[in-house]
Image (spheres, rainbow, N blue to C red):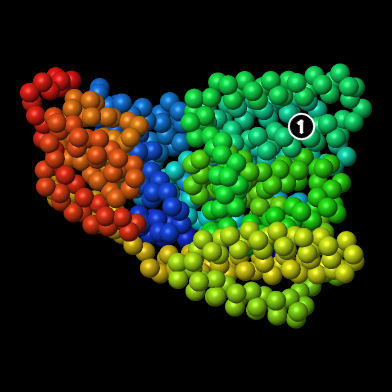
Amino acid sequence: MTRKYSHFIIILTIFICAIALRGIHINADTPSGLSWSAGLYVDEGYKTLSPRNLILFGKTHWHAADTYPGWMNYSPITQWSVYAAFKNFGISISSARLVPIIYFSLFILLYIFFMFRRHSSKIFYLGLVLLASDATLFTFSRVALFEMPISFFIYAMILPLSLYKEKTSISIYPLIGLFIGGIALTYLIKLSLLIYIFPVLAAASISFIVKNNKMSKNQLILFSSAFLIAILAILGFSYDDWSTRLNISPQLYVYSVIENPLLLTSPAIIIAGTLCAAHAIAYQSNLYLNNLYRLSLICMVLSAPFILSLFSYGPLRYYLPFVPAYILLIIEWFSTSTTETSRRITNRVFYVIGMLMFSLAVMYALTALKLSEYIQIRFIIVIGLSAALIVFLFRHQALPKNTVQKIMMAIISLSILQNIYFIGSFISNPRYDAETMRKRLSEIVKSDEVIAGGWAPFLTLGTPIKSIYASSAFNPPEALKLIQPNYFILSNTPVSLKTFERLNNDEQIIFGSAITLGKYNDTLVTIYPLSYNTENLPKNH
């Protein structure tokens, strides 16, 4: 067997295993406890509602009074992807979840294409295993939300930058193309993609200035001004979309930075990636400042908690597109700092890994005792103290380079163990509460009846029941009185309770006795039959 064929077999095996793991229990409930936001568990419904309606009823809105705009015009790439999945495999949660799995597969193929020749085989496989097994990537590559497609397109922009050489000067034209392409993608996928493009554009600008140090003062001012004007123009045009979620409180901002949700789902990766960034800037700055690809990863890693903390709403899924940057930076760091002699893992490293395995067991024991917040804050302290200690010892030549690499390898081993535990726990004990609710809902609600509520699109997905997405922002009582849904679905979440209260206060909407569907994601779900006081009721469209 030739060496090339051996690599092909290994890569194919890892790739197939990674995709197969995501396909197992594809219609099972998303693992609970990952995010405080209910969006991770139910937003699959309303974000696939337009393609579903288009197939079932021939249009995205089956009722003219429906005020929920859907995503067909705001995220055509994701919506038509879901439409294709529904058209070919049937309208179900399983079909919808094929879309993020496909985008994850494409991302892994991009990694293989660009990184196989860039790194040694050991470092390449390390990166491949980390990407394939990361708990956060695993979760979001099998839920029908927008973050996995966003991640694919972000790294479809970043990975080709690895083709740039350190000493090659950068032309302004590829940067303009990168900028225009990135902006175009925001209107084809989701406007929030701008958040992830900014670090890449910042890296490109820094690299351009560093490599073109012969620029005149006027040229530098012109370039900087054009870049600033373009950014301000984009922010101005999209002001209404992001300004309402802006976090302008210094106290809340600091709290949001500390309470980075990634520290609960991928703690070892975040610690290792941050330490790699700190070490690279302190001792290998030339290798990173003069390389557009590495600089982009540095900017992504360092900016992640600070950019997203600008907004008052920052659930775990918003952090997902930053996760691959941490992993890619880790393998880049190994590639630039590893020597032949330090590649050998000694008995001391195995001892360290053993201690970390024990720490992992303790961490999960504490998490089971509901001390996750305590652990989360301690992780941020660990990052700071570890970075300070490593920099101090390295500067005073008390810590050899290969020792730093062993520490990193131990942390990464912890990450792989943690991910195996997470994925194994899910596969061995899946829950199907949502599927049970769908069956019960089909027994209660007739196929020609309508159910409204924030969770309605999710729990009717895969059934013939018509659903209306009703929340605090869409389909107020005035709209529902025109549509006249037969049922309202209530979950014990703040948004759902607020919507319920507003409808219940309307004298023309009459709620019947509650019917319990069960619990999903540890949240009680009930439905209420609705009737309407026909006196002075608006005409139904």
Quarter of the image containing the C terminus? Answer: top left
Looking at the image, which is closer to me, 17 or 250?
250
Looking at the image, which is closer to me, 508 or 519?
508
Q: Is residue 383 above or below residue 414?
A: above
Look at 42% across and 33% down and name the residue there.
Answer: 80
Look at 75% across and 34% down and name the residue there.
Answer: 204
Q: Is residue 369 above or below residue 254?
A: below
Look at 67% across and 75% down and name the residue there.
Answer: 353
Question: Identity of the amino acid at label 1?
Answer: Ser
According to the image, label 1 marks what residue? 205
Look at 39% across and 49% down and name the residue there.
Answer: 38
Q: For the residue carrying disc 1, how many other residues have a C-alpha within 10 Å: few (<14), some (14-19), or many (20+)?
A: some
The answer to whether residue 218 of the structure is visible from this angle is yes
- Tell me which corner region of the image, top left, top right, bottom left or bottom right, holds residue 45: top left
Residue 247 in picture, x, y percent from top left: 54, 37
Residue 433 in picture, x, y percent from top left: 29, 58
Quarter of the image containing the N terminus? Answer: bottom right
Q: Is residue 137 above or below residue 191?
A: below
- Tell me which corner region of the image, top left, top right, bottom left or bottom right, holds residue 472: top left
